[in-house]
């Protein structure tokens, strides 16, 4: 009786090997890791730009505060001169009052600008905190995914390494003449052996004739699909 079970298992192993090798080339997890890494790099670049803006705003704030302090000192000095009798000329008093009003206006303008800078600084600080939290979350996700990916790759390598030995053990149990026919057919058909399910060839889904089904069940000779030409396997 012809038994193609071992040949069928060899074909399944070959399909598994092909699938595993394909996974190495186009792994979805690897694509996700690359996309996530690019996203992290873009976020880091945005964080760096925002941090530089924050630093510039801090410098600007310090300068405005120093300018305000300087203006207040000038106002204080001029007010003292006006009220301690240092200035006696009416013309000089009028001129000093005008300068004093100008300096007070400058103080108000500078304080308004300082307040606006403080508000901008706070807005940028909040953005930095939010972006930092997002970056930490992305980095954590990347590390976890990368660990899973490495484990997955190691598992696939182990499975691939086991296939040749398993395949050789099965091959030793296959009739040499049947194997020669199988190899010859493989030059034209990727999977030359098809299992029969519900009276049909699983290679092309076409139903078998009564005579072919009876010959398969008897197992005395090789049976081929009349539609696709595959060698047929009836699992007992």
Image (cartoon, rainbow, N blue to C red):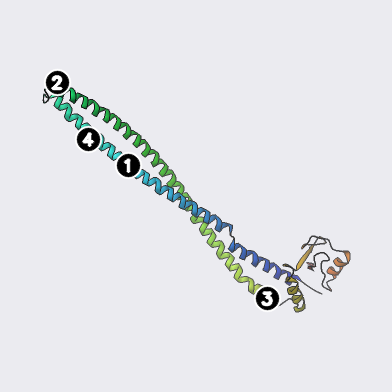
**In 3D space, how far apart are the residues under numbered discs 1 and 3 (Cα atoms)?**
74 Å
**In 3D space, how far apart are the residues under numbered discs 2 and 3 (Cα atoms)?**
117 Å
Which residue is labeled 2 in the image? 90
Helix, strand or loop at label 3? It is helix
CB contact under 8 Å: marks 4 and 2: no
Which residue is labeled 1 in the image? 58
Residue 43 coordinates in the image, percent (x, y): 45, 49
Q: Residues within 10 Å of mark 3 (few under 14, many from 20)?
A: few
**In 3D space, how far apart are the residues under numbered discs 1 and 2 (Cα atoms)?**
44 Å
Depth check, mark 1 against mark 2: the one in front is 2
Which label's residue is closer to the chain start, 4 or 2? 4
Which residue is labeled 4 in the image? 70
Residue 226 coordinates in the image, percent (x, y): 84, 66
**In 3D space, how far apart are the residues under numbered discs 4 and 1 (Cα atoms)?**
18 Å
- Quarter of the C terminus within the rendering: bottom right
Point 67% across, 69% down: residue: 14
CB contact under 8 Å: marks 3 and 4: no
Total numbered labels placed on residues in the image: 4
Residue 148 coordinates in the image, percent (x, y): 54, 58
């Amino acid at each position: 009786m012809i038994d193609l079970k071992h040949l069928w298992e060899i074909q399944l192993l070959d399909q598994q090997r092909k699938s595993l090798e394909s996974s190495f080339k186009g792994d979805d997890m690897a694509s996700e890791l690359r996309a996530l890494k690019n996203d992290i790099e873009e976020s880091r670049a945005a964080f760096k730009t925002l941090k530089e803006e924050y630093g510039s705003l801090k410098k600007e704030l310090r300068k405005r505060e120093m300018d305000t302090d300087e203006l207040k000192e000038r106002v204080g000095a001029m007010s003292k001169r006006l009220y301690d009798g240092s200035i006696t000329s009416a013309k000089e008093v009028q001129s000093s009052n005008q300068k004093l009003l100008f300096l007070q206006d400058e103080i108000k303008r500078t304080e308004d600008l300082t307040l606006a800078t403080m508000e901008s600084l706070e807005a940028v600080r909040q953005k930095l905190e939010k972006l930092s939290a997002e970056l930490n979350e992305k980095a954590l996700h990347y590390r976890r995914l990368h660990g899973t990916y490495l484990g997955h790759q190691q598992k696939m390598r182990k499975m691939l390494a086991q296939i040749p030995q398993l395949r050789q053990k099965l091959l030793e149990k296959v009739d040499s003449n049947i194997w020669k026919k199988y190899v010859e057919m493989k030059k034209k058909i990727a999977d030359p052996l098809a299992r029969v399910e519900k009276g049909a060839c699983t290679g092309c889904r076409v139903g078998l004739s009564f005579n072919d089904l009876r010959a398969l069940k008897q197992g005395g000779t090789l049976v081929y699909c009349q539609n696709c030409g595959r060698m047929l396997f009836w699992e007992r």
